[in-house]
Every structure is written in C-alpha cells, then in structure tokens.
C-alpha cells in the first residue's frame, strides 16, 4: 500500500472513532501500530495535507478555509516545509 493511501486510511480510522481528544489520540496510535508507522503524529499528517494542497495549486486562503487553519498557520507550515527542502538539497 502506498504511504499516502496508508495515511489516508489511518486518518479515516482515527476520525471514525473520535469521541474526544483522548479517544482520537488513542485511535491514531492504534492505526499507526497496525500500519507499522512509529514516527508520525496526527499533526504531521495535517501539515502534509497543507503542503500537498499547495503543490496541487490551492492558494493559502483556500487551504486555510478547507483545513480550518488561519492564513498565518498555513503560511508557517509552508515556510517550514520550504526550509526543510532547502536543507535536504
């Protein structure tokens, strides 16, 4: 299974059983365990979604609306991603 498909499945599993923050955290942990993923948090997944939406051509205001983030938060995520890419090159 591709990583993005696995992450989508993990997010769906976590979201389907979310009743509270603690339940969401426990569900995410169980989904990660089942998928054999040990180095990701739910927030990593949300940040990846922001970056992929930008790569696909979505503008910051669109991403902010869709992800329920402020524009500043979206810009911060995208800047951090850009810095990470520069450091790896």
Image (cartoon, rainbow, N blue to C red):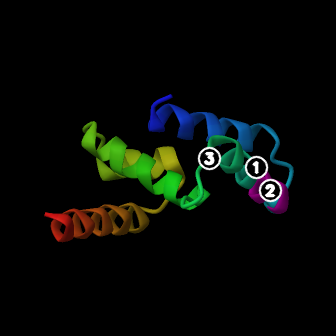
Q: Quadrant of residue 7?
A: top right
Task: Count residues near mark 2 (Cα–Cα under 10 Å), then give few for <14, some for 14-19, many for 20+.
Answer: some
Which is the main secondary structure of the residues drawn in magenta?
helix
Q: Which residue is mark 2?
A: 26
Q: Secondary structure at mark 1?
A: helix
Q: Find out whether the residues at labels 1 and 2 contact each other: C-beta distance under 8 Å.
A: yes
Mark number, residue 30: 1
Mark number, residue 17: none
Q: Is residue 20 left or right of residue 39?
A: right
Q: Is residue 80 left or right of residue 42?
A: left
Residue displayed at 31% across by 69% down: 80
Q: Earlier in the sequence, mark 2 or mark 3?
A: 2
Q: Secondary structure at mark 3?
A: loop
Q: Which residue is mark 3?
A: 36
Please state which of residues 18 and 59 is positioned toward the viewer in this rendering. 18
Question: The C terminus is located in which quarter?
Answer: bottom left
Disc 2 to disc 3, C-alpha distance: 15 Å
Task: Count residues near mark 1 (Cα–Cα under 10 Å), then give few for <14, some for 14-19, many for 20+.
Answer: some
Measuring from the top left, give residue 15's x and y in whole percent. 72, 42
Measuring from the top left, give residue 64's x and y in whole percent. 44, 53
Measuring from the top left, give residue 45's x and y in whole percent. 51, 52
Q: Quadrant of residue 10?
A: top right
Q: Which residues are magenta?
A: 22-27
Residue displayed at 45% across by 31% down: 2
Residue displayed at 72% across by 44% down: 14
Measuring from the top left, give residue 88's x and y in whole percent. 20, 65
Residue that extends furthest to the top in the rendered view of this protein: 1
């Amino acid at each position: 299974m591709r990583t993005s498909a696995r992450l989508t499945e993990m997010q769906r599993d976590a979201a389907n059983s979310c009743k509270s923050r603690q339940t969401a955290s426990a569900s995410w942990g169980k989904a990660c365990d089942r998928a054999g993923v040990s180095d990701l948090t739910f927030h990593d997944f949300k940040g990846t979604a922001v970056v992929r939406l930008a790569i696909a051509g979505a503008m910051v205001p669109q991403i902010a609306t869709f992800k329920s983030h402020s524009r500043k938060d979206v810009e911060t995520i995208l800047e951090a991603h850009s810095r990470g890419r520069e450091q790896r090159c």
